[in-house]
Amino acid sequence: MAPGRPMDEGVPISMKTTTLVAIKRGLLLYWSLWFTIVFVTTLLGGLEALGAIDKGWKLARGDFTLISPAAAIYGVPAKASGVLLACLMVWEGSAVVVFWWAFRKFRGLKNADGRALAAAFILAISLFAALLLAGLLFGGHLLMATHLKILVALLLSFLVVYFLPE
């Protein structure tokens, strides 16, 4: 490559488009897998909290042990914290379904199912915005930095998928 010349000079447009679509599909695949893992680990953690599975599962996240004491600050009973965890699992599970739907349907923006893309990013971005607000309300400051990083990554992924020209 000569200095001052674009990197993609001489590359056919169809190859550029194929590469960008693959990158966008890769992002959708990543978030599909990521939310699947998060959902499964949250589910296992919930089952562990209920006593349905033995304690000590490596994949079981301790979301209930984070939610219950934080909610207790406001006098929320442990059973209501279980409802909060169930709501979190429904939200995460919905993100799993729509991200896999978006990944399956995406073949470039011209051929994309806009409903699937919109639903996936709206659910995911709103989930992490809600988790940040919950962190402010319930004192979950330890996780706020992580939730903020995930929110930023989702927003960047959204921008790449929607606005990077193919």
Image: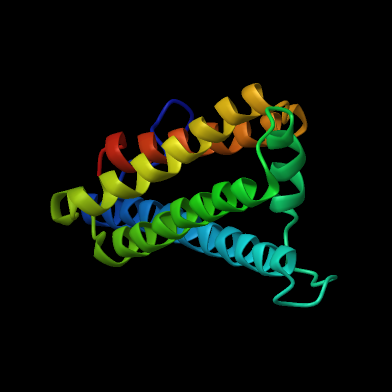
Q: Residue at x 80, y 77 (%)?
A: 54
Residue 36, image x, y percentages: 52, 64
For the C terminus, the quadrant is: top left
In this view, the residue farthest toward the right is 56
In this view, the residue farthest toward the left is 110
Q: Residue at x 49, y 50 (%)?
A: 87
Of 55 and 155, nearer the camera is: 55
Residue 144, image x, y percentages: 68, 30
Of 127 and 146, nearer the camera is: 127
Q: Residue at x 70, y 52 (%)?
A: 64
Query: Does 147 sit left or right of 68 as displayed?
Result: left
Residue 140, image x, y percentages: 72, 31
Q: Residue at x 64, y 22 (%)?
A: 136
In this view, the residue farthest toward the top is 136
Q: Is residue 97 above or below residue 66?
A: below
Q: How is the image coloured?
A: rainbow
Q: Residue 51 appears in which quarter of the rendering?
A: bottom right
Asked if residue 1 shows in the view, the reply is no
